[in-house]
Image (cartoon, rainbow, N blue to C red):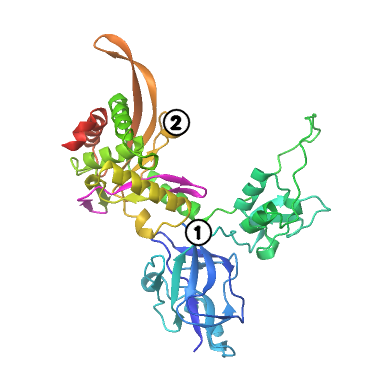
Amino acid sequence: MAEKFLMPKLSPTMEEGQISRWVKNEGEAFEANETLAEVDTDKATMEMTALSGGTLLKILKGAGDTAALGEAIAIIGKAGEDISALLSESPASAGSQKADQREPLAKASASSSGNGNGSAASTVTATTKETASPVSKAASSATITQPENAGSSDGGRMIVSPIAARMAADNGIDLRSVTGSGPNGRIIKRDIEEALAGGGSAKPAATAKPFTPSTIVGASSFREESTSKMRQVIASRLAESIGPIPTFYLTVEIEMDSLLATRKQVNANLDDDAKISVNDIIVKAAAMSLMKHSWVNASYQDKIVKFYEQADIGVAVAIDEGLITPVVRGANLKGLSEISAEIKDLAGKAKAKKLLPEEYTGATFSISNLGMMGIKEFTAIINPPEAAIIAVGSSNPTPVVRDGEITVRSIMNVTMSCDHRAIDGATGARFLQTFKQMLESPAMMLL
């Protein structure tokens, strides 16, 4: 019997999904667990597969289209089946599996079924393939103006995915010589890879000419890129944070000399792939400090405050499409080697878009460290519903006065952003005092 294939919930923060591409075409048969389509969510590109075999009878949402959770995106069934009744349903009826009837969150490689009548069961699988953001309109992709004699995919414009444009620029590929294989002739990552491997018709970019004064006047030309679902969610979540949440900031200077010496001693006895970083120690110190200050390891939600029994630390990781915070669960119970190995594993998964939802949601406290990028001091935005986040700057040799004499110490600035609904100024200050003591005297973490 023909049935509707619904948009499932692929991540905790997902409200809608954008069809990246259909792997199967209308009229094509598919086997059980075979991929039908790829969907761009706020966190990753996911593959959708049906639990049983059949035929893709009708595509309701094409490449580039966005569908709400539980909304029908296709009709599947047996070849030749009459689907006129399903097609005649109103959009409201077709998308009735929303809000109160949305599909439950599906883990990677776990199944999620539609909850309404005539809805297709589906399986959701995380994919590491880089797929082009789909195109249904000119504004939904990167566009580059071409010369009149160059090939055009869209009214004189070349349609290029952001990652393809970046790869081409990095490798000196002339995009005008590449034939796009994506929707509407869009140039995607695969096309650049083929060009680099010699399978495409790409030609090296022309050698730069000596600079000569230009007679061009007027505003600069530009290109537009659609934002990814991940970037849209980041923007939405941070807008929720900085406005409604009454936030204040506390900054403390921490002497890192003892910690750096301790780390050097520890790493001298470890293999290269097992060495611990300063950030690993910061995570441990934060976790131990949270156990002594319950109001910081908390979450204000409406008229209640949740106090968490363990320290689940979110560690900010920068990826191409934004920022994601993999979570080290129960960091207060783990040793430095275990924390270090777990952070390396989670960071690798984040950059490969392999993180499962439970690996990047539900932190009780977060750490954003830009010290390795030379940033001395900054403030970070709280990730709701957490009550605080610390921004870690670089450690720099600094002249300080100790016992009436000027000496040089490695000083690191740490700024904590606090939700004033849960954390008062004195509460935040006491937490930072404990945190500072543990970093300046690492043996304190053994107590």
Closer-to-camera residue (336/162): 336
Task: Specify the segment rendered in magenta.
Answer: 302-325
Please report the residue visible at 67 percent of the width from the left and 48 percent of the height from the top. 168
Please report the residue visible at 27 percent of the width from the left and 40 percent of the height from the top. 284
> Vertical placement of 415 versus 141: above or below?
above
The location of residue 285, given as percent across then percent down, is 26, 37
The location of residue 195, given as percent across then percent down, is 70, 54
- Let me know if residue 194 is in the magenta part: no
> Vertical placement of 43 versus 410: above or below?
below
Whole-Å distance between the Cαs marked 2 and 1? 31 Å
Q: Is residue 387 visible?
A: no
The kind of secondary structure element at disc 2 is loop
Answer with the quarter of the image where residue 207 lies.
top right
Q: In this view, does 304 lie to the left or right of 382?
A: left
The amino acid type of the residue labelled 1 equals: Thr
Q: Residues within 10 Å of mark 1 (few under 14, many from 20)?
A: some
Q: How crowded is mark 2: few (under 14 residues within 10 Å), some or many (20 or more)?
A: some
The amino acid type of the residue labelled 2 equals: Ile
- Which dot marks residue 128? 1
Q: Name the residue under label 2.
A: 375
